[in-house]
Structure formats: structure tokens, C-alpha cells
Image (tube, helix red, strand yellow):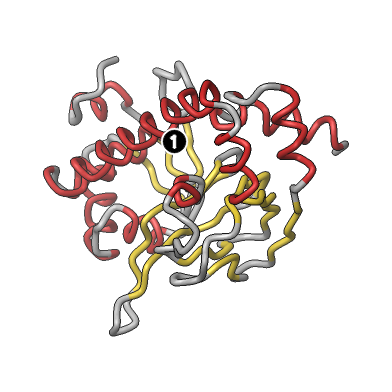
Amino acid sequence: MTQEEISTEIRRTPLFGALLDDQFARVMQGMHCHQLAKGERLFSQGEPVQSFYFLRRGLVKLFRTSPDGDEKVVELVSSGQIFAEALMFMGGDAAYPLHAESVDISEVLSFDAHAFVSLLRDSPETSFRMMATLSRRLHQFLNEIDSLSLRNATYRLVIYLLQQLPVNIAESTSIHLPATKNLIASKLSIQPETLSRILHRLRDRGLIEVQGNDIVLCDIHALRSMTDIDD
């Protein structure tokens, strides 16, 4: 893929879409490409924030580890997503609150966080557009926290499955889970054995079929009726 095609791909994201052409060109000058092997660490919890990232291909998990070594997946970043961008506004001594590790072979683009903040200081109008973008991200996280804390495990899993659907799909269709069931269970704050039981119950009701990481949603209308999502 050419540099122009990469620029076009990045420009579609809300964060970079808020930049003027000359600002975008300045940011792209400091871009670096990282090819990550499966299981390779991009950054670790506690490291100083130097960059934010755009995932071009692959899958990256953001997770924390407890003092006992238990792992809690906070987010599964998929292709086309930006991550760690909000941390650049926390000051010069900010540290990454999570680990970032490649779940599969991945290509990640990094951008200098300090240079980006400097650019925003020079343009209040761009800063306000950026604040609107980050506010939307904050609302998304708040909705996810609400789902994790106030909804039961079946609701959380059904919502997750429906979120994997392509846009405007209402008929029976197959989806491919982007990560292992254990990782997805961790992200949804569900024990792996509980996730397996829920999948079996949904299958027994004729709502889904499970073939490894491929899941057929047999009755999307019935699955939606289990949530607050409208048809």
C-alpha cells in the first residue's frame, strides 16, 4: 500500500479528520510503522506516554494485570481503530495505564503524542473539534461501563455478538469472533465457563449455531429482543 493510500485510510478516522490539511501533513511526518508478531508487547503499563497509535491490520488487546498476575482485558482493538490517544492530554509525566499486546500478527502506526499536543496548542479551533471527538469516545466507554456493571452476562454477550454484525443486516448471518473466547470473556467480565454455558443455551434455543470462532446468528430479531437495540 502506498503512502497516499495509508494517509487516506488514517484520514477517515474522527481524530485525524478534525485536522486541517497542513496539520495532517505535519503529523504524518512523525509517523512510524511497527510490525508486531503474535504476542509481542507494544507498550507496558507504567511506561511514560510517548505515542498514540492506529491499528492498520491485526488485533491488539489492552489489558491490566493484578498483583496476583491475573489479566483483565479492557479493550480489543481491531483494524482501523486509534488507541491511547486520550493519554497525551494528561501532561508530560503521564504513564500508560494498560499493557498493549498483539493478539495476532499486526501492523501498528505510531504518532508522536507531544508533537500532536503542540499542534493543537497552535490552533484553538482544531482543539475544540478534537474535544468533541474525545467526548464521543468517553460516552462510548461510559455506556460500556454501564453495560458491564448493570447488565447480566447473557445481555453483555448478546450485545457483543450483535455488534459484530455488518451494517443493515437483519437476516441470519455468520460472524467470526476476532479473538479467542477466553479473551472475549475477559473483556465482557464473564468467566470463560459462563460464556460457554450461555453460548450453549442460545444454541439450544435455536438462536445461534457455534462452529469454533464462527457463529451463525440464526434469529437476529429474537437476539435483538433480548436487548434494548431496536430493529
In the foreground, 83 or 51: 51
Residue 2 at x, y percent in the picture: 88, 36
Name the residue at 81% across, 31% down: 5
Q: Is residue 127 depicted above or below 74 in this figure?
A: above
Residue 3 at x, y percent in the picture: 85, 37
Determine which residue is flagged by label 1. 164
Q: Image quadrant of residue 172?
A: top left
Amino acid at circle 1:
Gln
The number of numbered badges drawn on the structure is 1
Residue 37 at x, y percent in the picture: 69, 67
Name the residue at 45% across, 45% down: 86
Residue 188 at x, y percent in the picture: 29, 52
In the foreground, 90 or 13: 90
Q: Quadrant of the N terminus?
A: top right
Name the residue at 21% across, 48% down: 148
Q: Is residue 75 left or right of residue 11?
A: left
Q: Quadrant of the C terminus?
A: top left
Q: Is residue 30 depicted above or below 15 in this figure?
A: below
In the foreground, 82 or 80: 82
Q: Image quadrant of residue 156?
A: top left
Name the residue at 63% across, 67% down: 38
Q: Residues within 10 Å of mark 1 (few under 14, many from 20)?
A: few
